Structures are given as C-alpha cells and as structure tokens.
Image: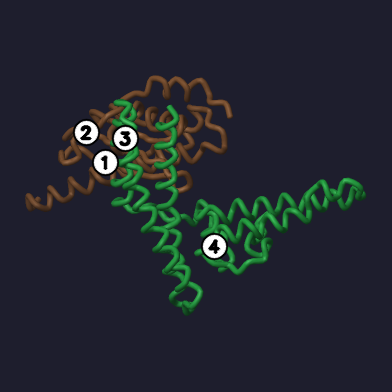
Amino acid sequence: MALDPFALLGIPPRFDLDIEATERRFRELSRVVHPDRFAGAGAHERRQALGRSIDLNDAWRKLRDPISRAEALLRAQGVEVSEASQPRASQALLLDFMELREQLAETRASRDVAAARLLAAEVQGREGAVLRRLSEGFTRLAEASPAERGPLAASLLEGVGELRYVRRFLDEVRAIEED
Amino acid sequence: MAYSDKVIEHYENPRNVGTLDKNDDAVGTGLVGAPACGDVMRLQIKVSDEGVIEDAKFKTFGCGSAIASSSLATEWLKGKNIDEAETIKNSMIAEELNLPPVKIHCSVLAEDAIKSAIADYRRKRAEKKALQGG
C-alpha cells in the first residue's frame, strides 16, 4: 500500500513542492498508461496499465495535500506515522480551536457568512505559519544528526496535527458557505 | 455508514450541552482533541464537597458518534462519586452506543475527556488544600 508517492512520480522528496510542475509530471506519466492506449492490448497489460494509473492518481492526491505530503516525507525518513504516533495536541491549541469552533457555531446560528469568512481568514493565516514551520523543519530534518532527528520529527508531527484542526475548521466554514 | 439508533437519539437530543464556570474550584474541565480528524470535545464536572458529581456538561464539535459519546458520558457521570466515575471505560460507551470499529476512537475521546476533567478537579483541590496549608 504505502508506495512512496515521490518515487512514483519520480520527483525529489521535499515539502516545498512546485505544485504545477508536479501536476504536469503526473499528467505526462498518466497519459502513457491511459486505458485508451491499451484498448488493443492483452488482459495482463491492460490490468498493469490500470494498476499503474491508479498508483499515479493516488501519488498525486497525496502530494498535492500538505498533510499527506508531510506524512509521506516523514515515512520516507523512517518516522512512524499512525494514529498512535500522533502526539496529543497542546492544551493551548485545543483552547484556541474550541473557542474558534464556538465562534463559528455562532456565525452559523446567525447566518453571518461574512463573520465566518473572517474567522476562516484568521485560521488560514495560522495555516500559513504552520506550513512555513513545516517547510523549515523538513529542511533541517534532511541535515539533522541522529540525536536531533527525534525531537525534530516530533515537532513536525505536531505541526501536521495542527493542520488537521485547521482543515476541519475550514471544512466547517465551507459547509456554512454552502448552506 | 449507518449510525445506531442510540447514537442518533443522543445526536438529536444531546443531554447536558453547555458550560460550567471553569474558574470554580468545584469544577473540573477536560479538553481533548482527536488528532486524526481535528474534532474537539470539552467535558466539565461539578463536584460536591462529598466528592459526588452534581452536574456535568459537554460541548463537542465533531461527528455524531463523538457527540453521542460525550452526551452519554455526562449522563453517566451525574450522581456518581469521582472514584466511580474514573472506572468508566471507552468500551462501555462504545458498547452502549453500538459504535462500529471506525468510530471507537470517539468513545476513547470521551474517556479521555472524563479522565482529564477528573484530573483537573483533583489538581485544583490539591492546590486549594496547599494554599490553606492543610
């Protein structure tokens, strides 16, 4: 299952990804294994091409999302990524998001989409800061000594965790906008 | 995925939604999050001098199972003394609500919230005692 998405697309593993270039790469590779090209081929070849096509889609989906991209990078560095290895969020983070969610619930109750968007902008600012922190962290991880790696990996996992609270919040904002 | 009738019942009629004064010495607050999905849950207990939970409130931003788990937890907590309350296990919540395996973590979250609320209450009490020199 856990094929390295960077290896699949044949691009160097890094957090700061040129998303457009990665998408171009994905499209190029996908074209080669497109089912139309295998219409006249044998069953085995068709199945292989389809499998490759699915793997490529999966890799692109993982790479364009910063959370799964970060997880793939951590795994490639031998860091365990699972629900059990996910550090608990700090009380400060939980307090912030509890308050944000309460404020968002109020905007929903009063159908104040403008206020919800204001909250979203605040959380997006926070998301930007976490992404920068992750980007710096991954750069340092690549050059870290064995003793530095543990704490660095832990702080990266924490950043990924924060992104999940961010995403959940922004999903809620979208739900309000669509209401 | 289909929710059980009990989950739907708690989701539609959640018990004890609300807030207790977190600065009250008799109130313990547990604030927990689900790292996998970014849901947050707050559970509070108000404990009498005799150590009995007089009131319990929760606020959960999460899926139906997380809301039902915390709603059920507050129902169970009320009237129990805190030592009894501490024996509530996530498996009991999961069983009562017929949670499917993918939703077990919601009951784990509720157990965590109960434990954190009790720990917070105990910590406050110990601090108060220390201040009184007792």
Question: Do tags 1 and 4 sit on the same chain?
Answer: no
Residue B91 relative to residue A90: left or right: right
Alpha-carbon distance for marks 2 and 1? 9 Å
Query: Looking at this view, is A147 or A74 the one in front?
Result: A74
| Color style of the picture | by chain
Alpha-carbon distance for marks 1 and 4? 44 Å
Alpha-carbon distance for marks 3 and 1? 32 Å
Q: Chain of mark 1?
A: B
Quarter the N terminus of chain A occupies: bottom right
Quarter the C terminus of chain A occupies: top left
Cβ–Cβ under 8 Å for marks 2 and 1:
yes
* Residue at 90% in and 47% down: A43
Per the rendering, the colour in which chain A appears is: green
Badge 4 crowding class, 10 Å Cα cut-off, few under 14, some 14 to 19, many 20 or more, is: few
Q: Position of residue A95 (x, y in %)?
A: 29, 46
The amino acid type, in three-letter code, at marker 4 is Asp
Q: Which mark is residue B20?
A: 2
The amino acid type, in three-letter code, at marker 1 is Thr
Q: Position of residue A62 (x, y in %)?
A: 59, 53
* Residue at 78% in and 56% down: A32
